[in-house]
Image (cartoon, rainbow, N blue to C red):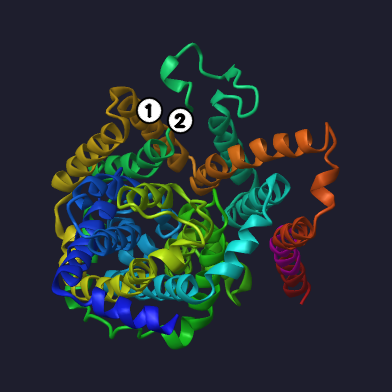
Amino acid sequence: MWDNIRVAITLMFQWQSVLAMTIGVAVGICIGALPGLSATMGVALVIPLTFAMPPEVGLLLIAGIYNGAIYGGSITALLIRVPGTPASCATIFDGYPMTQKGQANVALEVAISSSVFGGVISALALLFIAPPLAEFSLAFGPPEYFWLAVFGLTIIVSLASESMVKGLLSGCLGLFVGMIGQDPVTARVRFTFGIPDLLGGVELVTMLIGLFSIPQALAMLENKLQSLTLDMANDVEQEKSPPMFHLFGELWRTYVRSSIIGTVIGVIPGAGANIASYIGYSEARRNSKNPELFGTGIPEGVAASEAANNAVTGGSLIPLLTLGIPGNAVSAIVLGGLMIHGLTVGPQLFTDNADIVYTFMLGMLFTNLIMLFFGYYGARVFVNVIRIPNNVLAPLVIVLSVIGAFAIRNSMFDVGIMLFFGLVGYLMEKFAYPLAPAVLAVILGPMAESNLRRTMLMGRGSIRPLFTRPICWVLIVLTVVSLAIPFMRRFKKGKGREGSLAN
């Protein structure tokens, strides 16, 4: 292995390779920051450009775009409360409140440092412990996926901190939206209301753009945020850029925990960065000494989300390179790129084309370091977004949202869906219904349903397979603990209040 790594280092530091990685990271950050343009789309668009390149150079370009796009979504999430990618939705919860408090530079520094930390950890896992992690991913079948989805849905209890009823209603809305389209097993049409464009369900990215972008733009147009934005700009003007990794001593547990969570979830085929960011955020909140501060604008919330979603990048390539099984949509496109260059994924890839595959894996590591440079030194440029007057920024957000929604499938119907969910999101915020449970339910609801149905087919109508596998019981225990802890904390708070009143 070490001989292959030495050869890969030589290939990676050729000027063409370094240029490809640098351009890839820069382009990826721009793609991730634009609503509607995801890492999947960015990698798909660049694949044709790699035809004429040497395989190692083309793969390094892909590595840069993949890492850069996942991080880039956090920039607009932090500054204007518009997630550039679905993976950055959880970053909004504490990132934007930090910007409102004049701590945009701190939020951006925590986002880039945690993103790079998560990416480096997952790249090291890809480089050194890929085979055992790939075997772990094979242990996941429909029963395990069902319990993983249920465990993720328990996060709704944590996210619904203000009102449990409103949080659950928001989650139910998400579950309903996730059922629109065709039944995952029988393909029977449901809840489409005779609209052919809904046969494939509601496009997740379109819904996310509407729920988060449009309400923010409408609030700007109401001039409710104008004075706040001016205060934020003034605070940022006086704020000095913090040193790189300046909060690592306080947040290292969160960095490590979320990086491990993201890497493991990346290894599991079908899971993704959006699920990892929510679970990373929830686990940070559950393990925090002050969980009530989450959502008010604390660096720990930003670090938890960003370390987890960026750790998915290397993790998702582990089953692809070792077993030929794509971990998510991006790695499926990477599979196409490998095949275009005549590379066959699987164990033989490490013997027949070891120099190229090790160059790619080292590129996943090195592009994170390039991203650290862009993210840290570009922060002063990024924060200028909040200095744009609201009467300019709000229409710009709406225009970008329309373009992003249209670009997903070149469909004006998607634009209409985006605007509809924009109105729904605006009304939900008006009446204090949290958006996060709805988004989480849309992501995990179909996953839970389809895998429950497959499990019942495995058991010939019985749910017995859900309770006969070791990983299932681990996930069941985690689910019970995740549900119990918020209620126990509320019970303790209630007893504490009663005691103070009695005194």
- How far apart, in angstroms, are the residues tagged by discs 1 and 2? 8 Å
Residue at left offset 15%, top offset 44%? 391
How many residues crowd mark 1 within 10 Å: few (<14), some (14–19), many (20+)? Answer: some
What amino acid type should be assigned to the residue bearing mark 2? Val
Magenta span main SS: helix
Relative to 126, is 9 on the left or the right?
Answer: left
393 is higher (above) or lower (below) than 92: above
Residue at left offset 74%, top offset 63%? 481
Q: Nearer the viewer, residue 451 or 15?
A: 15
Residue farthest to the top, as pictured? 194
Label 1, secondary structure: give it.
helix
Q: Which residue is mark 1?
A: 417
Q: Which residue is mark 2?
A: 202
Q: Is residue 78 visible?
A: no
The part of the image, by quadrant, that contains residue 185 is: top right
Query: Where, quadrant-wise, is the C terminus in this rendering?
Result: bottom right
Of the two numbered discs 1 and 2 in the rendering, the one whose residue sits closer to the viewer: 2
Residue at left offset 58%, top offset 74%? 290
The part of the image, by quadrant, that contains residue 235 is: bottom left
Residue 258 spot, x, y in % from top left:
52, 70
Residue 180 spot, x, y in % from top left:
54, 26
* Region in magenta: 483-492
Disc 1 to disc 2: CB gap under 8 Å: yes
Relative to 232, is 361 on the left or the right?
Answer: right
Label 2, secondary structure: give it.
loop
Query: Where, quadrant-wise, is the N terminus in this rendering?
Result: bottom left
Q: Nearer the viewer, residue 21 or 400?
A: 21
363 is higher (above) or lower (below) than 144: below
What amino acid type should be assigned to the residue bearing mark 1? Ile
